[in-house]
Structures are given as C-alpha cells and as structure tokens.
Amino acid sequence: MDSLIELFISTAFVASTMRLAVPLILAGTGEVISERAGILNIGLEGMMLMGSFTAVLAADATGDPWLGALAGAVGGMAVAAVHGGIVIVWSGDQIVSGLALNLGALGLTTYLSRRIFGTGQSEVAHFEPIDIPLLSDLPFLGPVLFAQSPFFYFALAAAAVLSFVLFRTRFGLSWQAAGEDPDALDSVGISVGRTRWTALLVCGAMAGFGGASISLAQLFTFIENMTGGQGFIALALVIVTRWRPMWAVGIALFFAAADALSLRIQALDLAAIPFQLSLMLPLVLTLVVYGFAARAGRPPAALGRPWTKA
C-alpha cells in the first residue's frame, strides 16, 4: 500500500499522467464539437490512427516534426471527410460508417506502413519536452506542468478556445442548434449541412493531432494499431464530460492516470498481478465510469440522426 501511495504522489507518475492525457484531451474535445452538432463519430479511433501514420510519414520525409503534426491533422480530417460524405451528404448510418472507417484505417495504415517503412522501427523527427524557463525548475510542478511537449500546451489551449467558441459565439450556437433542432437552424437560413461539416472537420483535425501526439511525442515512430483503443476511451469521455470541452481535461487526466498506473503496476510486485490484467485497467475503469455517467447526461436531441432539407 505504501508503494502505491508513493507512486501516486511521485513526480514521474504525475508527469506521465499529463503526457498520456494529451491524446484523450485532443480527441475528446473534438468529439464534443462533432456530437454537439449532431454527428456521432464512432470513427474517432480511425482518425487518430490515420493522424499517427501521416504525422510519421511527413516527419520522416521532411525531417520537421511541426510539418508532421500538421500532416497528422490533415490525415484525421481526410477520414472525417469520408465520414461526412457518407452521413451528411448521403444520410448514411453514422455508427456503421464509423465502424467501417475504423477497420479501413487500421487496414490501410498497416498495409502502407509495411510497404513504406518495412518491419523495422526507426525514429523520425519528433518533439522533445519544452522546458519553460524558471517555471520548469519549480519543485514538483516544474516537471509536471512546465516540461511537456508542445502538444500538451496546445491541448489545453484548444479545449479552452473550443469551449469559448461553443458557448460564447454565434458559430458555436449554430453547432449546438444543429445537434438539438436542425429544422430550427434551417428555418433561420443557416445551412445545417455546412454547420455539421465544419464541426466534423474540426473533430477530424483534433483527432489527427491526438494521433500525432502519440507518434511524435511519445513513441517517435509508427506502430501498427498504436492508438490501442484510445479513440473509444475518448468517446466514453465525451459522455462523462456531458458534452463540455473543458471538462474533457479533468476526465482525460483520470483515464490517463489509470493508463499510467497500468504501465507501472508490474514494477510494484503486487501479488504478481499478470500484466494482461493491468493492461485491462484503463478500459475497465472507462466502462465503470461510463455506466454511472450515461444515466446522468442528456445527449443532443438530434445526435446520430441524419437530416435532409424538406
């Protein structure tokens, strides 16, 4: 027990939690925007995976991790565009489309990575933690908050900006109206389709950045299926946050702490817990938290429903 307490208050564990929360914050805040506009994006995992791959591909080709991060966003948006064509233009089933995109992204990235990179894994140009002068030297808080990758600071800023846009601007109110009552939005002359497209593409870009944060700031290479279900955890995170972008930060930290614990629990020699059980911990906690939160939250009224102009 003492070793567990020491782990939870250790600087390394908290800093690791912050780092692991970044993909969830990015993908989760993007999904909040998409669902607020009425688009259920089950394909979030595929968008993150494509973002991871295109980020590594661009960083390897150019030697510039910033261009890699941008390519990651473009990769996520490309998958989002396919989803938009199916569910917005053709009014297809949003769940079926998302699941198909997840499988398609997994197969495509696996095939292309083997063709381009082979079976060997080599590091590409990547992001190192940024030590903010003076602040990074602070005890505990320094390495936890002020010695992280650029993705960490971007994730916090993006959550704040998207929260402001969603609740304080006319553009954000249009997103909300598209998810609550698209007929009312159309009646005032605002295009429901265009509104949903913008929300979905924002979601794709954020998911792509989330995937890029894994490949360029954590692993420095591409590994098949490297997102490992984080897109599905982000989907549950959205419900727990009750569709509020800023809440995604706190909930993502909770899930990331479970992930960090699962990676370290073997070193604690806790009754020889099999590593398979420790790796299940984040997903099990996700299901438990989701079970309690799903009953309390109310999703947007038109979430998942195709809309066509009468």
Image (cartoon, rainbow, N blue to C red):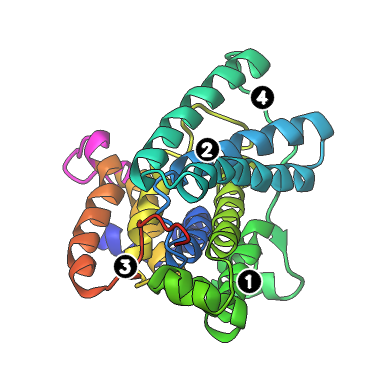
Residue tagged 2: 49
The kind of residue tagged 4 is Ser
Residues at circles 1 and 4 in contact by the CB criterion of under 8 Å = no
Disc number lying in front (4 or 2): 2
Labelled pair 2, 3 in contact (Cβ < 8 Å): no
Residue 122 is tagged as 4
The amino acid sitting under disc 3 is Val
Q: Secondary structure at mark 2?
A: helix
Q: Report, in whole angstroms, how far the alpha carbon at label 1 lies from the one at label 2.
A: 23 Å
Confirm or deny contact between disc 1 and disc 3 (CB under 8 A): no
- The tag earlier along the polypeptide, 4 or 3, is 4
Residue ID at (42%, 30%): 103
Q: Residues within 10 Å of mark 4 (few under 14, many from 20)?
A: few
Query: Mark 1 highlights which residue?
Result: 157
Vertical side of 166 occupied by 54: above or below: above
For residue 212, what is the image quadrant? top right
User: Circle 1 — which element?
Assistant: helix
x, y (%) of residue 278?
26, 43
* Residue 186 is covered by the magenta coloring: no
Q: Where 93 sits versus 53, above or below? A: below
Q: Nearer the viewer, mark 1 or mark 4?
A: 1
51 sits left or right of 21 in the view = right
Quarter of the image with the N terminus is bottom left
Q: Which residue is mark 3?
A: 240
Could you say whether the residue bearing mark 3 is in a helix, strand or loop? helix
How far apart, in angstroms, are the residues tagged by discs 1 and 3? 21 Å
Judge whether 79 appears above or below 21 on screen: above
Q: CA distance from mark 2 to mark 3?
A: 23 Å
